[in-house]
Amino acid sequence: MEKLEKLYEGKAKQLFATDDPEVLWVEYKNSATAGDGEKKEDFEGKGRLNNLITTLIFSLLKARGIDSHLVKRVDDTAQLVRKMTMFPLEIVLRNTAAGHFCSRLGVEEGLEFKEPVLEYFLKNDDLHDPFVNDDDLVVLDVCTREDLAEIAPLARRINEALIDIFSKIDVKLVDFKIEMGRTSDGTLLLADEITPDSCRLWDQRDKSGKVEHLDKDLFRRDLGDIIPAYEEIERRLAALAEAE
Ligand code: C5P
């Protein structure tokens, strides 16, 4: 597969065309951003780790009946994915209170929810990705009721499968963000990435009682180096994939 012209550059990835019109080339970058892009730093090895972690998670999800845009990993920092028409949506699932749920609603971090919370944010840099509900999305023509009737159950199934995956490696899945799109034949698929950049992951092997973050909150909140944490997630997921 040949890597052709660059189509798009985001905060953490670059997207290239390939000689197959149905396939794109994704390069994972070493940069980390937080606070709506205000905080930015490069971490040697982050691109490689996120490429490995996304590939492992998408494979573990596939084994649980959930397909994604992933075709295959091609090298350390790159993977091939199916070309999709993306919904301009950040789909967030929360199992435990953290982050913006706490700041918005005045809830203490760590509150366990009696059921998962599904939230949508419109991808729009100028508006800083506003929180939106189903009606907003329909009247803005971002998606139809029928799309939402497919997106929401898929997002909840992904949450169930990810809880299962992470519980097997002694990690609590606090919350995460995913994106979805449709292939040229109209199939709804999980796309983008699932990495410690896009999830809150709390270590359950540490018995000290204090939260041990294995995710980008280490960078967002200046709690420590992200690379050893991402390496730990990669090691545990690789061991699980090997065992399954
Ligand atoms: O910031 P907030 O609490 O809304 O984040 C919820 C989850 O979504 C977190 O796991 C965070 O990593 C992820 N997220 C993301 N990209 C964004 C916003 C949130 O991956 N732009």
Image (cartoon, helix red, strand yellow):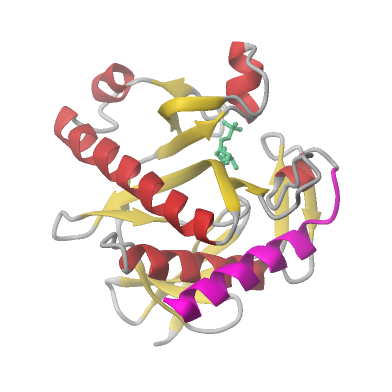
- Residue 48, given in percent of the width and then of the height, sits at 64, 73
Measured as percent of width and height from the top left, residue 121 is found at: 45, 30
Quadrant containing ligand 1? top right
Could you tell me residue 23's position as x and y percent?
33, 73
* Side of 110 relative to 154 (left or right): right
Position of 20 relative to 66 (above/below): below
The residue shown at (45%, 36%) is 93
Q: Does residue 128 appear anywhere in the picture?
A: yes
Q: Is residue 51 visible?
A: no
User: At which x and y percent is residue 25?
Assistant: 45, 73
Query: Is 238 in the magenta?
Result: yes
Reply yes or no: does residue 127 show up in magenta: no
Residue lying farthest to the front in this orientation: 207
The image shows a total of numbered marks equal to 0
Residue at figure coordinates x 36%, y 20% from the top left: 133
Q: Quadrant of the N terminus?
A: bottom left
181 shown above or below 230 = above
Dominant secondary structure of the residues highlighted in magenta in the image: helix
User: Residue at (34%, 54%) from the top-left corner?
Assistant: 190
Q: Is residue 91 left or right of residue 215?
A: left
Name the residue at the bottom extreme: 1
| Horizontal side of residue 70 vs 187, given as left or right | right
When asked about the image quadrant of residue 132, the answer is top left
- The residue positioned 46% from the left and 59% from the top of the image is 165
Find the magenta span and give its range: 223-244
Is 232 situated above or below 132?
Answer: below
* Quadrant (top left/top right/bottom left/bottom right) for the C terminus: bottom left
Question: In which image quadrant can residue 80 be found?
Answer: bottom left
> Of residues 139 and 154, which is closer to you in this image?
154
Residues 222 and 128: in front is: 222
Foreground of the two, 16 or 211: 211
